[in-house]
Image: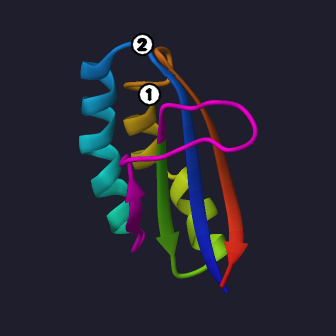
Amino acid sequence: MKGYWIAKYKTIGNKDKLKNYAELAIQAIEDFGGASLVRGGKYKTLEGDEFIRTVIWEFKDYDTAINCYNSEKYQEAWSHAKQTTIRDLLIIEGV
């Protein structure tokens, strides 16, 4: 079964730092075979807490998604934005 990252961004305090993160993170994620399914776009919150951005990545399986997140390359990328960005990030197994 495939693995997915689902990120809901609540606040982005520094867009330049987030841009730096994204540039590095995309390469790290693609190195693990991750494919972008959703990166921003129009949305409407119908239930639950409001958020400002959603990102969904698909991986070949759950373990690969976990390994990517824990990788040195991804963690280095995240270090560029984690002090100024608040998000919920889930890794979930799906079809």
Q: Is residue 49 magenta?
A: yes
Instruction: Name the residue beneath numbered marker 1.
Output: 79
x 74%, y 42%: residue? 47
Say above or below: 57 vs 40.
below
Q: Nearer the viewer, residue 78 or 12?
A: 12
Look at the image and give the residue range highlighted in magenta: 32-53
x 37%, y 38%: residue? 77
Helix, strand or loop: magenta stretch? loop
Classify mark 2: helix, strand or loop: loop
Quarter the C terminus occupies: bottom right
Residue 25: x and y in percent read 35, 47
First of labels 1, 2 by sequence position: 2
Using a 10 Å C-alpha cutoff, classify the residue at mark 2 as few (fewer than 14 neighbours), some (14 to 19) or many (20 or more).
Answer: some
Q: Nearer the viewer, residue 87 or 63?
A: 87
Residue 75: x and y in percent read 48, 40
Instruction: Name the residue beneath numbered marker 2.
Output: 13
- Report whether 41 appears left or right of 75: left
Quarter the N terminus occupies: bottom right
Q: Which numbered disc covers residue 21?
A: none
Whether residue 70 can be seen here: no
